[in-house]
Image (tube, rainbow, N blue to C red):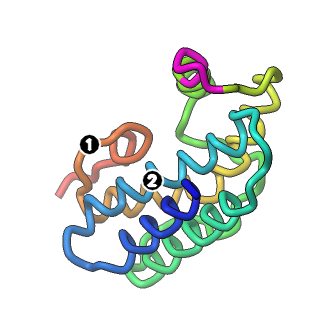
Amino acid sequence: MILRIIAFTLGTLLVIPRAMPDRITAAGAVLDAAALTLSTLDIPHDFQADLCLRAGYLALGNIADFFNAPYNPNPPAGDPISITRAEFDAADDQLASQDLPVKFNRDQAWRDYSGWRVNYDQVLLALAELTVAPQAPWSSDRAVKRSV
């Protein structure tokens, strides 16, 4: 049920054109929530999270294409992402501190998370830069700001 809400929210965020900068950071938060759920939480697999991620990074790609924002639409699985392993580990620790069931193999969880994130990392940062998105962790806080 929660993933249906996430998917609906992501769809709503990306369809409504006003306040685009806020919606880009919100989309990043939704995609990271789905990626962390799939990679890090030790719960039964829910394919709705897969669909949320796929629909989300395709939607961001379509928006970036419309604005000619630079990104690689087919990044290799091993490409680096803007989230560091230390940041991921801190998020994993925070989930565990809230008594959420985290997966035992943190190295595998990191590989799984970065494997999802690579699909939307560049495009999320490009759109955050393009829209001058408000500061938000793991998205606009690392977008490259160009001088005017």
Q: Amino acid at mark 2?
A: Gly
Residue 62 on the magenta span: no
Q: Is residue 66 left or right of residue 75?
A: left
Q: Quadrant of residue 47?
A: bottom right
Q: Residues within 10 Å of mark 2 (few under 14, many from 20)?
A: many
Could you tell me which residue is drawn at 60 percent across and 72 percent down?
55
Q: Which quadrant holds the N terminus?
A: bottom right
Using a 10 Å C-alpha cutoff, classify the residue at mark 1 as few (fewer than 14 neighbours), some (14 to 19) or many (20 or more).
some
- The reply, left or right, for residue 107 in relation to residue 86 is right
Q: Which residue is mark 1?
A: 135
Residue that sits furthest to the left in the current view: 148
Mark 2, secondary structure of its residue: helix
Residue linked to disc 2:
28
Magenta segment boundaries in residue numbering: 95-100
Which image quarter holds the C terminus?
A: bottom left
Mark seen at residue 89 = none
- Residue drawn at x 60%, y 43% is 81
Quarter residue 16 falls in: bottom left
At horizontal 75% and vertical 38% (from top left) the residue drawn is 43
Which quadrant of the structure image shows residue 86? Answer: top right
Residue 71 lies, with reference to residue 77, above or below; the image says below
Residue occupying image coordinates x 53% and y 40%: 82
Q: Residue 93, how many percent across, how many down?
A: 58, 17
